[in-house]
Amino acid sequence: MRVGSDLRAGDPDRHVKVKQRGSVLNMLRRLDKIRFRGHKRDDFLDLAESPNASDTECGDEIPLKIPRTSPRDSEELRDPAGPGTLIMAAGVQDFSRTEFDRLNEIKGHLEIALLEKHFLQEELRKLREETNSEMLRQELDRERQRRIELEQKIQEVLKARTEEQSAQQPPKGQAQVNNGADRRSQGLCPRVQKWFYERFGEYVEDFRFQPEESAVETEEPLSARRLTENMRRLKRGAKPVTSFVKNLSALSDWYSVYTSAIAFTVYMNAVWHGWAIPMFLFLAILRLSLNYLIARGWRIQWSIVPEVSEAVEPPKEDLTVSEKFQLVLDVAQKAQNLFGKMADILEKIKNLFMWVQPEITQKLYVALWAAFLASCFLPYRLVGLAVGLYAGIKFFLIDFIFKRCPRLRAKYDTPYIIWKSLPTDPQLKERSSAAAVSRRLQTASSRSYVSSAPAGLSKDEDAGRFHGTKKGNFHEIFNLTENERPLAVCENGWRCCLINRDRKMPTDYIRNGVLYVTENYLCFESSKSGSSKRNKVIKLVDITDIQKYKVLSVLPGSGMGIAVSTPSTQKPLVFGAMVHRDEAFETIFNQYMKITAAAASGSDS
C-alpha cells in the first residue's frame, strides 16, 4: 500500500492516491479459483484441522495486521501545510476498513469450501460402507473359483464321453448304413415335431408352470351407505336358500295337505323301486327349466309357502347425523345377530367332533361304526332302501308329530336333544368360571365354618359373609351389616359412571365404578377411590323417583342411564353408560316396589 500526496500551491484540497498491494490481489485470484467447488479446493486444510470458530470469533481473536509505512511513505505523509493530514488519515482508515472486509469475505468462503469438502468426504465414507466393496470382492472371487471348478468338471465329462464314443465306434460298413438311416430320421423328425406343435402346441403351452401372482385387495373405507347396501345384497343373495328351506319346512309341517301327501307318496315309491337319485336329478332339471322360463319373462310361481313381497324403502340422499348413526346401529345389530348364529352353529359342530361332551360324541361314534359295518356286510341296495325309508318317515311323519308335541320331542327326538345340549364356546367359558367360583366359595366357607362360624349359621348367611368385591368384603367397603349382599342378578355388579350434578368439581362430577343392588340398599363402588368416602350408598326406601334416563339427547335410542331422586340431593343422581341398563332398571324397580310394599304393610298393621 502506497500513499502519495499531490500538493499544489494555492490548492486547498488534498488528494489521497491509494494503491493496492500485490498480496490482496493474489488472495482474490486464489479465491476465484476455489469458489463454488473449484478444482484446487482439496489443497486447503480439512474441517477437522481448521480452527473451530465462527467469523466473528476469528475477527476478535486474530488481530488484523495494519500495513506499515516505510520512512519514505511517512515522509510523504507529512504535510507541512498542516490541514491536509486529517484528510489523508481518513483515506488510510477507509482503505484499511475495505481491506478488513475483503479479508473477512475471503475467510468466509474458505470456511464454506472446507465445509463442503468435509460433507463430501462423509458422503463418500457412507457410500463405501453401504456398498461393502470388500464383501462384493470376496463374493466375486468365490464365484470365479466356482466357475473354474465347473469348467473343469465339464471338461472331464466331455473327455469321458469322447472316450466312450471312441470305444463303442462301429465298423465302417455298419457306420455308413447307420449314417443313411440317421439322415432319413433327421429329415422326418423336424416334420413330425412341426406337425405335433401345430396340432397340440397350444394345449402343451397351457400346462406350462408359471409363478403364482399374489394380488393384494384394497380395503374400502367404512361407509354407512355401503354397509347398508352390502346387507341388502346378502339378504337378496340368501333369498333362494331361505325360500328352499321354508318350502321343505312347509312340506314337513303339512302346510298344504295335498302337496305333502303327493310328495310323500312319490318319494316312498321312488325309494322302494330304487329311483330316488333319478327323481332328485329330474327335480333339479325341472327347477332349472322353470328358472329359464322365469328369466325369459314368464310369470311362474312354484312355491308351497306364498311369498310376501317386502316394501323396499328407497335410499335417502340427505341424512342427518342422527339418522346415519341410527342406520349404522341397525345394520350393526343385524350383522351381530347373524354372525352370532353362524358362530353358534360352527362352534357346536366343532365341539361335537372334539369330544367336549363325551356322552354326546359317543352316540355319534357308535352310529358311525354301525353305518360302517352295515356298508361292509350288507348290499348297497338294501342299505340305500333302509336309509331312504327312514329319512322319508322321519321327515314327513315323525317330525310332524314332534313339532306338534314339544314335550314328546324333548324326551325322544335324539338329534334335537343332541343339538340343543351341545355347548358353544361362551357357554363353556361361563361354566368353567362358575365352577371355579363355586370351588373357591366352598373352600372358603368350609374353612371359615370350621374356624369361626357360630352355631346355626345358614348357607345364605355364610355365603353373604364371604362375598366380596375386588377391594375387599362387601359389607366392609360400604359399612353395612354382614347380611347385606348383592342380589344374584348383580353378583358381579353393573359397570357404569355416577353423574352427580350437585358437585362442581370435574373429579366429583363423574365417577366410574360398579353398581350393586342389595335387599335394602343401592350401592355404588368407585373404581378410583382408595377409601369408602367416594362410594355411594342409597337406601331403597329413601328413593322418591326412579326412571330411565338419556344422558346425551343427540344420540339415537332411549339412552343408557338410570336417574334416581332422593330427598338429600337437589338434582337426581344419574348412573350412565350402563350396557345392561334395562336389566338393572327392572331389578332396582322390582326391589324398590318390594321394599315399599313391605313398609306400607308394616305401617298398616
Image (tube, rainbow, N blue to C red):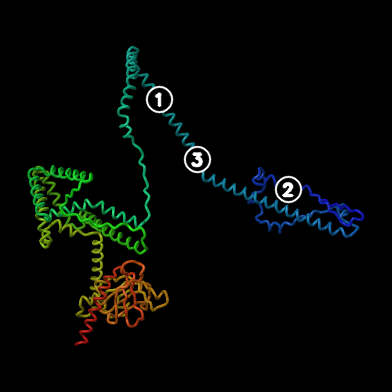
Going from N to C along the chain, the mark reached first, 3 or 1, is 3
Q: CA distance from mark 1 to mark 2?
A: 74 Å
* Badge 3 amino acid: Leu
The image position of residue 382, as x and y in percent, is 8, 44
Q: Give the foreground label among 3 and 2.
A: 2
Q: Residues within 10 Å of mark 2 (few under 14, many from 20)?
A: some
* Badge 2 amino acid: Met
Are the residues tagged 3 and 1 within 8 Å (C-beta)?
no
| Residue 543 visible | no
* 11 with respect to 253 (left or right): right
| Residue 445 visible | yes
Question: In this figure, which residue is indicated by the disc labeled 1?
Answer: 158
* 360 with respect to 47 (left or right): left
Check residue 136 in the rendering and tell me which mark sits there, or answer none: 3
Q: Nearer the viewer, residue 133 or 56?
A: 56
In the rendered image of this protein, does residue 39 appear above or below residue 432?
above
Check residue 27 in the rendering and tell me which mark sits there, or answer none: 2
Q: Residue at x 37, y 52 (%)?
A: 219
* Badge 1 amino acid: Leu
Q: Nearer the viewer, residue 109 or 70?
A: 109
Q: Give the foreground label among 1 and 2.
A: 2
Q: Quadrant of the C terminus?
A: bottom left
The image position of residue 553, as x and y in percent, is 35, 70
Q: Residue at x 37, y 45 (%)?
A: 215
